[in-house]
């Protein structure tokens, strides 16, 4: 009964949206129209750690003030988690009243900034028409990609399409990798920082030449010229909140270090076994995602040198009391861990994974020592 009601409600909302969009088709902007790029601040939830980008179209003469954003998705999509993980998840452009948009970010206590585009009226109309066309055409849907296709890159795309040139390009931080650019966004979110550090592969080690984050776009817009004048007017703060540092008794480096210290110092078979099993399972997940997912950021993940699926062989031979092969595969994984250290030596996340490197080495070395064949001494 509840499901049926929700479906009917969804249909009604879609019809209302269609009516609104149909109305928008015949709207001609006045000389008092303004179009702005809206940058929303970061939040403490996982989905809001990077901020958000949208486009505001306002015209006081025709009582128009709407926000278009490319960050909408449907939680009720069948197999939502699998589709999102695979990179087969459809996001879409949506519009809503500016006042409702602001109320949402005010509720979440997230900053909102606005940069008005300094373009002629005919280009404002063209951009507005392009946004409208995106709402009703196949362009409404797109497959989300973390770097290449997201709410920020879609805004860049539609503005450049309107200007008929690649006017908006990245102007700052082009000498940093995507991984280095992302890393500070996870401050005060330790396990999110650790998780993204080890799940991402080689793509995020490329130089960050594409605009893919809201505040990257904001910084670049300040520096871009169009027709011999700045593309955007001065950045305007709409709402600014005092930054709140999230406090968590578990989501911090101390619980992480304590857990690994227990593994190192307890020195019990069952503890070492569970630790190595966890490491091997994580490596298997990374390997699976590299082949299964369309997200290129997850491919070619050299972190499996540390989270090695070959540890399963160590556990198998250890369980079957085969000392010879337990020793050999323990040594093999020790070498992989050492190789991993040199691979990531210059990476920004070396410090955060160092405790895992040390724990791996300690557990594997003492396992190798226990199973090394002793040479009898003949007197």
Image (cartoon, grey):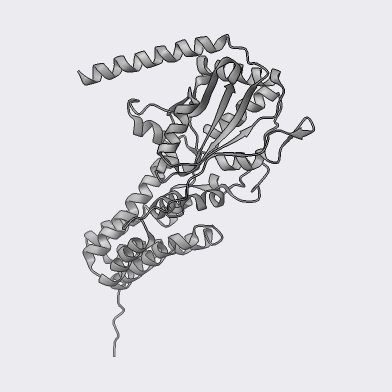
Quadrant housing the C terminus = bottom left
Residue 87, by quadrant, is: top left
Residue 47, by quadrant, is: top left
Residue at the left extreme, as displayed: 1
Q: Is residue 48 among what the camera can see?
A: yes
- Apparent side of residue 323 relative to residue 39 in the rendered image (left or right): left
Q: Is 197 located above or below residue 6 in the figure?
A: below
Q: Residue at x 24, y 16 (%)?
A: 4
Residue 228, by quadrant, is: top right
Q: 26 or 49, which lies in front?
A: 26
Residue at the right extreme, as displayed: 228
| Residue 269 image offset from top left, x and y in percent | 23, 66
| Residue 158 image offset from top left, x and y in percent | 61, 25
- Apparent side of residue 34 relative to residue 72 in the rendered image (left or right): right
Q: Residue at x 36, y 52 (%)?
A: 309
| Residue 364 image offset from top left, x and y in percent | 34, 66
Q: 29 or 166, which lies in front?
A: 29
Q: 292 or 73, which lies in front?
A: 73
Q: Is 359 located above or below residue 135 in the figure?
A: below
- Apparent side of residue 248 relative to residue 134 in the rendered image (left or right): left
Number of numbered tags placed on the structure image: 0
Q: Is residue 150 among what the camera can see?
A: no
- Apparent side of residue 377 relative to residue 216 in the rendered image (left or right): left
Q: Is 85 located above or below residue 12 in the figure?
A: below
Q: Residue at x 30, y 54 (%)?
A: 278
| Residue 267 image offset from top left, x and y in percent | 26, 70
């Amino acid at each position: 009964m509840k499901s049926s009601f929700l479906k009917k409600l969804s249909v009604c909302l879609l019809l209302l949206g269609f009516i609104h969009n149909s109305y928008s088709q015949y709207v001609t902007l006045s000389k008092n129209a303004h179009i702005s790029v809206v940058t929303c601040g970061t939040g403490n939830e996982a989905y809001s750690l990077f901020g958000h980008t949208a486009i505001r179209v306002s015209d006081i003469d025709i009582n128009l003030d709407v926000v278009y954003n490319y960050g909408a998705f449907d939680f009720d999509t069948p197999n939502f988690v699998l589709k999102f993980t695979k990179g087969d998840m459809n996001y879409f452009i949506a519009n809503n009243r500016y006042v409702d948009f602001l109320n949402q970010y005010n509720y979440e206590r997230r900053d909102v900034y606005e940069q008005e585009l300094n373009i002629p009226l005919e280009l404002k109309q063209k951009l507005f028409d392009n946004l409208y066309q995106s709402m009703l055409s196949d362009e409404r849907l797109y497959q989300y990609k973390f770097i290449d296709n997201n709410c920020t890159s879609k805004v860049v795309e539609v503005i450049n399409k309107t200007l008929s040139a690649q006017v908006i390009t990245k102007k700052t931080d082009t000498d940093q990798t995507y991984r280095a650019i992302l890393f500070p966004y996870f401050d005060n979110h330790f396990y999110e920082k650790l998780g993204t550090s080890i799940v991402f592969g080689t793509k995020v080690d490329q130089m960050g030449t594409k605009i893919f984050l809201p505040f990257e776009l904001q910084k670049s817009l300040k520096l871009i010229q169009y027709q011999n004048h700045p593309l955007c007017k001065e950045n305007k703060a709409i709402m600014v909140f005092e930054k709140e540092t999230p406090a968590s008794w578990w989501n911090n480096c101390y619980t992480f270090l304590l857990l690994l210290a227990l593994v190192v110092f307890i020195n019990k078979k069952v503890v070492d076994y569970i630790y190595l099993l966890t490491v091997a399972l994580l490596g298997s997940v990374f390997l699976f995602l590299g082949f299964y997912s369309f997200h290129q950021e997850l491919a070619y993940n050299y972190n499996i040198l540390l989270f090695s699926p070959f540890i399963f062989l160590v556990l198998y031979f250890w369980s079957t009391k085969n000392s010879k092969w337990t020793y050999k595969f323990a040594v093999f994984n020790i070498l992989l861990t050492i190789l991993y250290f040199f691979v990531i030596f210059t990476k920004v996340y070396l410090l955060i994974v160092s405790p895992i490197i040390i724990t791996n080495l300690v557990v594997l070395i003492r396992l190798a020592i226990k199973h090394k064949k002793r040479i009898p001494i003949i007197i």
